[in-house]
Image (cartoon, helix red, strand yellow):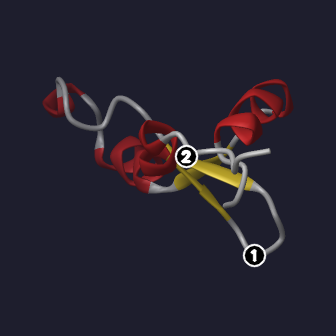
Amino acid sequence: MPKMKTKKSAAKRFKRTGSGKLMHESQAQNHLAGTKNARRMRRLRRDKDLAPGDRRKIETLLPYD
């Protein structure tokens, strides 16, 4: 059986941590940033943990990561 290919679009958006969790960048950072206060923008800069329901879908796209 041939090797599975990693979906490169998913590999650019999601990263796996050392403990195996999947992380993603938060949305809403660039567009209309002037209306968001500094505390909110700092919070948006952090990576977020992926929800358990979405995790199963993404793990099929990233078989070797």
Q: Give the amino acid at mark 1.
A: Gly
- Quarter of the image for the C terminus: give it: bottom right
Image location (x, y in percent) of residue 32: 17, 24
Mark 2 packing: few (<14 Cα in 10 Å), some, or many (20+)?
A: some
User: In which quarter of the view is residue 30 placed?
Assistant: top left
Mark 1 packing: few (<14 Cα in 10 Å), some, or many (20+)?
A: few
Q: CA distance from mark 2 to mark 1?
A: 14 Å
SS for dot 2: strand
Q: Nearer the viewer, residue 21 or 1?
A: 1
Q: Is residue 30 left or right of residue 50?
A: left
- Identify the residue under disc 2: 24
Vertical position of residue 20 compared to residue 28: above or below: below
Vertical position of residue 22 compared to residue 9: above or below: below
Image location (x, y in percent) of residue 39: 39, 49
Image location (x, y in percent) of residue 20: 81, 63
SS for dot 1: loop
Q: Give the amino acid at mark 2.
A: His
Q: Nearer the viewer, residue 11 or 26?
A: 11
Extreme-front residue of the structure: 1
User: In which quarter of the view is residue 36 placed?
Assistant: top left
Image location (x, y in percent) of residue 59: 75, 41
Q: Nearer the viewer, residue 44 or 65?
A: 65
Q: Residue at x 30, y 48 (%)?
A: 38
Tell me which numbered mark, 2 or 1, is placed earlier along the sequence.
1
- Identify the residue under disc 1: 18
Q: Residue at x 52, y 39 (%)?
A: 7
Q: Is residue 64 left or right of residue 30?
A: right
Q: Nearer the viewer, residue 42 or 60?
A: 60
- Quarter of the image for the N terminus: give it: top right
